[in-house]
Image (cartoon, grey):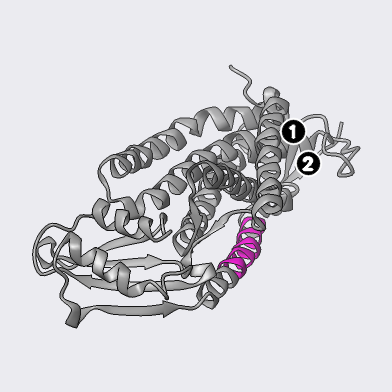
Amino acid sequence: MFNLIEKRRYFFIFSTIVIIAGVALMIYSTVTTGQPFHMGIDFVGGSVYELKFTEAGATENSIREVFAQFGQENVVLQQLGEPEDYRWSVRAGFNELEEQQQQLIDALDAVAPLDRDSLRVERVSATIGQEVTRAAFFAVIVATVVVTGFIVIAFRQVPNALRYGVCAILAMLHDVLIVLSIMAFASLLFGWEIDALFLTAVLTVVGFSVQDTIVLFDRIRENIPKHLGEPYETIVNRSVLETIHRSLATQLNAFFIMIAILLFGGETIKQFIAVLAVGFVTGTYSSIFIAVPLLVSWQKGEIPFVNQHSGVTSAVRTRREDDDELIEVTE
């Protein structure tokens, strides 16, 4: 049987390198631009333009080109209603647009005639992004507490049930850091911006990561009483090999759909889908190569300052006849 778990140090080193590189990019961006990422309109404020053209001619690219002429290259466009309605919503930062608003409208009118009576321009406060960020932060905290509590209760008959909850949370944090690292790279290279959709993608990745990890942990819980006498590492490795096809199948199905959306979807959601795709990949990776190996490392006393001498060298267990509880025996 192929021993995947014994290569855990390589997995830890790879993730550490990616995360350190991402943190370095965030520091570099903070030093050079004052922010770790490019912030979208939800965080820095801006204006929302609701445009209605009276005839065909205005396309997503042509509208972007007009805003780019006024220093707004990363606007967010959304087509409203049916294509024949010729209605668009454009979200742009402040900059000098307030002073050049009439010139901007004239430039848009040159692309295709505008219905100026239905034109609407609204200012967006930066506090919206702050509120969304605060809500997302509390959502992650609540999810951490709930997931840990659920795993401890569901795995109460397994020795050291708390470890399973802690490892699941560490894998979840690993995924968040990887997504932030990739975003820092894309922000510098492609000008991607942090917006409310990005936070939505991160929360979705958190949920997927925890779900995939619990599936693996549950198989370990089932295999412990089935393979009494086997080393814990062997049981864990067996559990991973038994469930890895399910994790990969789920990942590939979702990933193919995301690739299709990236290729044929609108420009507005491409960044959101790209973040989701990265998160789903790292979520599957962390469940198999981070969360489960962490369990083994903890069991064997390999984690610095934690459980340096576990006293347990194998998964020898016995059953107490009165309550059918699994008891761990040291050797």
The residue nearer to you, when weighing 223 against 69, is: 69
* Residue 251, horizontal then vertical, whole percent: 42, 38
Which residue occupies the extreme top position in the image? 1
Residue 328 visible: yes
Q: Quadrant of the N terminus?
A: top right
Q: Give, as a three-letter code, the residue at label 2.
A: Glu
Count neighbours of disc 1 (C-alpha within 10 A) and say few if under 14, some if 14 to 19, many if 20 or more: many
Which residue occupies the extreme bottom position in the image? 117
The residue nearer to you, when weighing 200 against 25, is: 25
Residue 82 in the image: above or below residue 116: above
Left or right of 170 on screen, residue 123: left
Residues in magenta, as a range: 136-152
- Identify the residue at horizontal 61%, vertical 70% (top origin): 138
* Residue 25, horizontal then vertical, whole percent: 66, 43
For residue 328, the mark is: 2
- Identify the residue at horizontal 20%, vertical 55% (top origin): 59
- Identify the residue at horizontal 69%, vertical 28% (top origin): 8
- Label 1, on which residue? 315
- Identify the residue at horizontal 48%, vertical 57% (top origin): 198
Count neighbours of disc 2 (C-alpha within 10 A) and say few if under 14, some if 14 to 19, many if 20 or more: some
Residue 222 visible: no
